[in-house]
Image: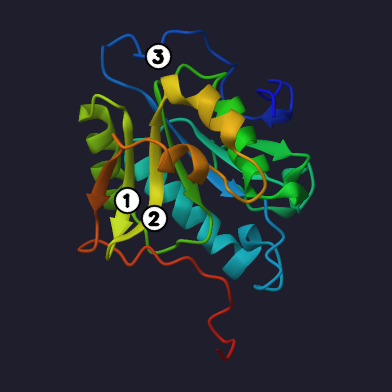
Amino acid sequence: MGVPNLGAGTEHGGDPLRGADRTGGTGAPECVGIVLAAGAGTRYGKPKVLAEGGAWLHSAVAALRGGGCDPIIVVLGATGPSPEIVDLPAGVRHVWAADWATGMSASFRAGLIAASRTSAAYAAIMPVDTPDVGADVVARVTGAAFAAPSGLARAVFHNTPGHPVVLAHKHWTSACREAVGDSGGRTYLSGNNDMVCVTCDDLATGNDRDYPASAAR
């Protein structure tokens, strides 16, 4: 699979796209926050970006923003290219993954493509359906990525890989190339033994929500 064309997603909102300086002019790393919210939420019964009146989306954005990420990009898909049906928080950019139905990798690629048009040196990626992951988790994982020579880190909950995942800019092209179907960043990350695993059991469960709270399981 080839490296995706930078025109594969359509980005809207936020400030005009910036150039290649990825230090913010201060020497401190900039980290873009990406919320993956393109799926149809078949098991949930509707797209999870709409779950609980948009509360999950607002929670994910608040976690990334509170953890130091700026700008924030929300990847849409099943709800269509217009954000009107989605309660986007103020100041958030959005991009539509037109091929969202092919799997999570489509939104993963669309998010990183949009991120490449910012000046960010890192990207912190979260799905929309982990509402108990807060800013403290994001800050811990981004800090680990900034300090690691590899520039790669991810949250781990009870020995299970979770989110956010943080990738330095140097990894984005390769990660996009290896993202196929529902793999998202999993294929690329599993092949990097220098990724830092950051234990966050004390801060959150990291559980993703596949069903409404009222559904009997």
The residue drawn where x is 71% and y is 30% is 9
**In the image, is 102 to the left or to the right of 108?**
right
Asked which secondary structure carries label 2, the reply is strand
What amino acid is found at the position of numbered circle 3 in the picture?
Answer: Arg
What amino acid is found at the position of numbered circle 2 in the picture?
Answer: Gly
Name which quarter of the figure residue 90 lies in.
top right
The residue drawn where x is 50% and y is 26% is 172
What amino acid is found at the position of numbered circle 1 in the picture?
Answer: Ala
Above or below, comparing residue 142 to residue 122 in the picture: below
* Residue 187 drawn at (x, y percent): 51, 42
For mark 3, what is the residue? 22
Q: Distance between the residues labelled 2 and 3?
A: 26 Å
Q: Which of marks 2 and 3 is in front?
A: 2
The residue drawn where x is 52% and y is 61% is 129
Q: Residues within 10 Å of mark 1 (few under 14, many from 20)?
A: many
For mark 2, what is the residue? 162
| Residue contact at pointers 2 and 1, CB within 8 angstroms | yes
Q: How far apart are marks 3 and 1 (CA)?
A: 24 Å
In the picture, the disc for residue 55 is none
Q: Nearer the N terminus, badge 2 or badge 3?
A: 3
For mark 1, what is the residue? 155
